[in-house]
Every structure is written in structure tokens, then in C-alpha cells.
Amino acid sequence: MAGIAQNENAVIISAPLIIQEGEYSVRRIGIEEARAWVRQHQPVNYCGHATVRVLGYEPAATRRHCPGYTEALAIKPAKRLEFGREYTRKEIEAIGFDLLLISRKKDREQRTSLDVPRYDDTAKST
């Protein structure tokens, strides 16, 4: 999908991950709805394994930090994939997978990270 402007608020991820505070909805979708979502949203691909091939993408070449999203399409294989093995699209389709659309709900009142103390394991109590 090179050459297409990507939407930083829409991402493809390899597992259903919640990486920022908020309320989310999650629903399973079919492959055609997922492909339509990809065409409409032009997401950034953070998925580093072969399951993303079912959507016409190649696995992300490098591991990058996903700072957050408004919507994410998670591709969850039906079984654990063998580490280091390259799978074809047909092999992924034979294994099976779930497509989960994760949508962040609009927060009525945004909390900041200052509202909740951060855990710091380096702090020593005396």
C-alpha cells in the first residue's frame, strides 16, 4: 500500500491491544468489511506477521511504536504461528483468523495522565 497517504488514527495491529486510556467497543467483522475499511481509512500497518497479507499488505518491515488510535483492525490468527516462518496468504487463510474492529469511544470527560499517579518501581519507601 505504498504511495497512499495513511491515516494515523486508523491502524492495523497483530492482536487486540488497548494502548491508551479510554472506552472502546470491539466487534468481529468479515473479510470483505475489513477490506472495505482498509480502502476507506488507509490505516498505518503495525502488524509484523503474515496474517496482514489477507488484507493486501506485507508484514511491517520494522517494529514501530503505535502511539494510539481511534480505530484499529486487529488480525488474530486461529492458532499460534510458528516463530520465524514465512506464511503465504493461502496458508493464513487455511489456518484461519479473526478480524476485530476496535473503536475508541469519544470520552465525555478526558482524563489526563496527571489524574492518576504513575507507578514507579524505582521509588523507595523509607
Image: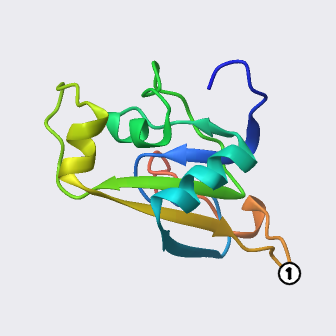
Inspect the image, locate mark 1, and give the three-letter code of the amino acid beneath it: Arg
Dot 1: few (<14), some (14–19), or many (≥20) neighbours within 10 Å?
A: few
Residue for point 66% across, 76% down: 23
Q: Is residue 39 left or right of residue 66?
A: right
In this view, the residue in front, 31 or 65, is 31
Q: Is residue 75 left or right of residue 23?
A: left
View extreme (left): residue: 82
The reply to whether residue 119 is in sight is: no
Say above or below: 114 vs 53. Answer: below
Q: Is residue 107 left or right of residue 54?
A: right
Residue for point 59% across, 55% down: 72
In this view, the residue in front, 109 or 75, is 75
Name the residue that disc number 1 marks. 108
The reply to whether residue 98 is in sight is: yes
Residue for point 57% across, 61% down: 33
User: Which of the 4 quarters of the picture holds residue 115?
Assistant: bottom right
Residue 29 image offset from top left, x and y in percent = 50, 68
Residue 111 image offset from top left, x and y in percent = 79, 70
Label 1 sits on a secondary structure element that is: loop
